[in-house]
Amino acid sequence: MLNSKQRAELRGMANSLEPIFQVGKGGVNDQLIRQVDETLEKRELIKVTALETSPESSREAADKIAEAVGADVVQVIGRKFVLYRKSKENQKIFLKTKNKK
């Protein structure tokens, strides 16, 4: 679970990202979830667009995908959302702020 400072740090990193997946009229399906899962393992931080034809809102799609792949929703703005999951083997993002326990 991300704290607000970590979320802010990731939002800053995501500003320059282009969306690499789209949730279309088929909605969130197994193929999309598998692709997002593989990509998060490689990149850790991705941006996704929910098209107007999507049966889910961008918030619903973000929550559904995040739950399926074990990721955190960093932000949802309009039709775009950002997901983060720490990679098991290819960690590239080292957050400056730590979780307090």
Image: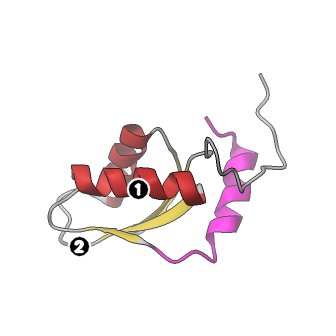
In the rendered structure, does residue 91 fall within the stretch colored magenta? Answer: no
Residue identified by numbered label 2: 52
- Residue 83: percent from the left, percent from the top? 51, 54
Circle 2 residues within 10 Å: few <14, some 14–19, many ≥20: few
Q: Is residue 16 left or right of residue 35?
A: right
Looking at the image, which residue is at 52% across and 63% down? 46
- Residue 39: percent from the left, percent from the top? 48, 59
Looking at the image, which residue is at 58% across and 60% down? 43
Furthest residue in direction front, as rendered: 89
User: Hey, what amino acid is under mark 1?
Assistant: Val
Q: Is residue 93 visible?
A: yes
Where disc 2 sits, the SS reads loop
Identify the disc placed on residue 36.
1
Q: Nearer the viewer, residue 16 or 57?
A: 16
User: Hey, what amino acid is under mark 2?
Assistant: Glu
- Residue 87: percent from the left, percent from the top? 61, 46
Picture quadrant of residue 36: bottom left
Q: Which region of the structure is painted magenta?
A: 1-19
Looking at the image, which residue is at 78% across and 49% down? 95
In the rendered structure, does residue 17 fall within the stretch colored magenta? Answer: yes
Furthest residue in direction right, as rendered: 96
Q: Is residue 74 visible?
A: no
- Residue 74: percent from the left, percent from the top? 56, 53
Circle 1 residues within 10 Å: few <14, some 14–19, many ≥20: many
Identify the disc placed on residue 3.
none
* Quadrant containing the C terminus in the rendered view: top right
Looking at the image, which residue is at 42% across and 42% down? 69
Picture quadrant of residue 44: bottom right
Where disc 1 sits, the SS reads helix
